[in-house]
Amino acid sequence: MSDIAVLANAVITIVGVVVLILKLRITPAIALVLGALYLGLVTGLGVPGTLESITTGFGELMTEVGLLIAFGVLLGAVMAQLGAIEKLVDVLVRACGPRALPYAFASTIGTVLQSIFADVLLVITAPLASRLSRQIGPWGAARMTAAMALGIEVGLVFVVPGVGAVALAGVLGLPFGKMFLFGAVTAVFTIVTTLALFTALAKRGLWKPELDERDDTLVDEAEQPAAERGTDHLPSLGVALAPLVVALALIAFGAIAEMAGWAHPVVALLGDPVIALLIGLIGALLIARWKLPAEQVESSLKRGFHESGQILILTGVGGSLAQTVKDAGLGEILKGYFTTSTVFPLLLVWLVAAVLHIAIGSVTLASITAAGVLGPVMPALGIDPVFVALAAGAGSLFAIHATSNTFWLLQTLLPQTTRGALKSCTFAVSCASVLAMLPIQLMALVF
């Protein structure tokens, strides 16, 4: 098959997946498998080759990310039950003044707390953000609603063990520690600069309190902060956070050791993200067994298993499509259309992910599809795959809107109208999508 025909069928595959999800309401997992089947068959892989690509892609990606996602989600579920988030926010409130609090709040959510499944993290922290928005003075609602949106969405795609970041690292075969280090730098820069920009624009007329805010906060009893439900039986902040801090420290140390060439079996074992999160999970379970009734611990684990299941399936079939694209030879074909510049290829990755997200409405699906399609060509251009992952994550943040479940959770749980959510979520996170490319492109040129 000619190169043009392969390129055309790759485009048809992507468009077909979008149509299946958007118009025919087919679940993304099935749509991705159908897309992989079509691409494999029409590009000459044959039935056995196509099936092998699908199963190999799924299996290899699950080998890379399966336990990491499961352990990360379970650790987050147990930590949420221990009340660690509410206690951490209380410390931030006491340590930071009104001016710095939104920045610290968003950066903490976008980095430290990414082991907690996004929807659960949002439900737990939104009442706290709503309460703080009334305590930090003028433009409090604008600043805290944007801080929530940025922390949740930016951390999801950049910082391991956020499920989007884990999926991207798995699709591209990246060391998770390396993704963690570069992703954390990108996330903090993006959150701080975007929130500063949004705050400045809000004060200059972008945010209209009479139209963009509402007085009531729709928070039911189950979503009240732990401090309001009684926390006498819960551990201190240091104890509650210790398992997560230990896990993140081990991941970071492992990444630094690998980059510095410190080869030792013990370092390799403890620095492996799966082992690090397993250690953190065991520690969190021991604390939970000590401080909580058995039924609460079992409930948190049950919720964690439920949440991780759907993430694992979607991530795995994303790997199936990526493997089929690779086996069809698309990467080798695209190689001839690029120069050795790092700027344009990464912008193309961003653009594809942005278009996919606008069409599909799924941040994770858009990012892993863009990375899977364009990732194979980048090493030949001298571009480290970690920057491909970050560019795909950045593009997938563009134009989060009414098709996103997170959009409606942010609108409902925070003191803002739908008009306000379009500004604090859609506009602010879209700005983050663009601003994130600054450190990504700079790091790609330097490293």
Image (cartoon, rainbow, N blue to C red):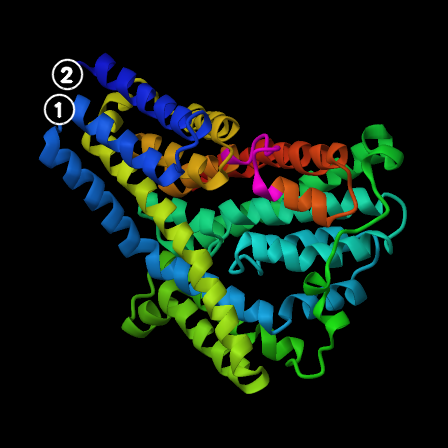
* Residue nearest the observer in this picture, 382 or 194: 194
* Residue nearest the observer in this picture, 90 or 403: 403
Is residue 365 rendered to the left or right of residue 318? Answer: right
Task: Identify the secondary structure beneath mark 2.
Answer: loop
Tell me which corner region of the image, top left, top right, bottom left or bottom right, holds residue 403.
top right
Residue 214 location (% of width, % of height):
83, 42
Task: Identify the secondary structure beneath mark 1.
Answer: loop
- Range covered by the magenta-colored residues: 396-406
* Residue nearest the observer in this picture, 233 or 20: 20
Q: Is residue 387 above or below residue 238?
A: above
Residue 22 location (% of width, % of height):
46, 28
* Residue nearest the observer in this picture, 346 or 27: 27
Tell me which corner region of the image, top left, top right, bottom left or bottom right, holds residue 171.
top left
Amino acid type, mark 2: Met
- The residue located at (23%, 50%) in the rendering is 59
Residue 322 location (% of width, % of height):
29, 36
Residue 9 location (% of width, % of height):
27, 19
Screen quadrant of the N terminus: top left
Q: Callout 2 environment at 10 Å: few (<14), some (14 to 19), or many (20+)?
A: few
Screen quadrant of the C terminus: top left
Front label number (2 vs 1): 1
- The residue located at (63%, 70%) in the rendering is 84
- The residue that disc 1 covers is 44
- The residue located at (20%, 45%) in the rendering is 56
Question: Is label 2 in contact with label 1 (beta carbons under 8 Å)?
Answer: yes
Amino acid type, mark 1: Gly
- The residue that disc 2 covers is 1
Question: Which secondary structure type mostly characterizes the magenta part of the structure?
Answer: loop
Q: CA distance from mark 2 to mark 1?
A: 7 Å
Q: Is residue 397 magenta?
A: yes
Q: Callout 1 environment at 10 Å: few (<14), some (14 to 19), or many (20+)?
A: few
Tell me which corner region of the image, top left, top right, bottom left or bottom right, holds residue 258.
bottom left
